[in-house]
Image (cartoon, rainbow, N blue to C red):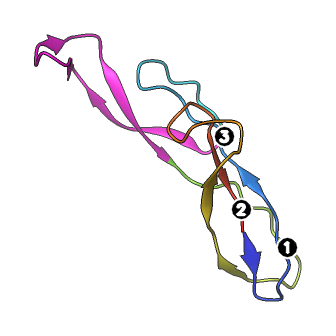
Amino acid sequence: MTYTDGSKTILTQSLSDWYTPQYYSGESIALTMAYHLNAAGAAIHPPVYLYAYSPRRQQRQGRQERDLTGQCERDRACGEPNAMTSSS
């Protein structure tokens, strides 16, 4: 997060996999899907979930948010659970 005064802070968001919600801070189930398709096109029936995330923001006295930029951590591939770090 970059503020209009040029200061920065790092926000981290953990992500659940689509089978098992972990109910991390800021995470909610946006959609429950009855099945998903495997590589062969067959329906797999345990329910899977699409999540919505709202960033945890701390009120900073006298500062306004300017932008939020996402990037992957150096030691994880993008798309892995817990791989996204929002920072500037």
Kind of residue at disc 1:
Arg
The answer to which of 64 and 43 lies nearer the viewer is 43
User: Residue at horizontal 75%, vertical 83%?
Assistant: 64
Locate the C terminus and report the quarter of the image it occupies.
bottom right
Disc 3 crowd rating (10 Å Cα; few below 14, some 14-19, many 20+) is few
- Relative horizontal placement of residue 3, taking residue 72 as reference (left or right): right
Magenta stretch bounds: 25-52
User: Who comes first in sequence, dot 1 or dot 3?
Assistant: 3
Disc 2 crowd rating (10 Å Cα; few below 14, some 14-19, many 20+) is some
User: Residue at horizontal 57%, vertical 37%?
Assistant: 77
- Name the spot of residue 23 as percent of width and height, x first: 59, 30
- For label 2, the residue is 87
Q: Which structural element holds mark 3?
A: loop
The answer to which of 53 and 71 lies nearer the viewer is 71
- For label 1, the residue is 60
User: Residue at horizontal 71%, vertical 62%?
Assistant: 87
The answer to which of 74 and 70 lies nearer the viewer is 74
- For label 3, the residue is 25
User: Label 2 to label 1, Cα distance in Å?
Assistant: 16 Å
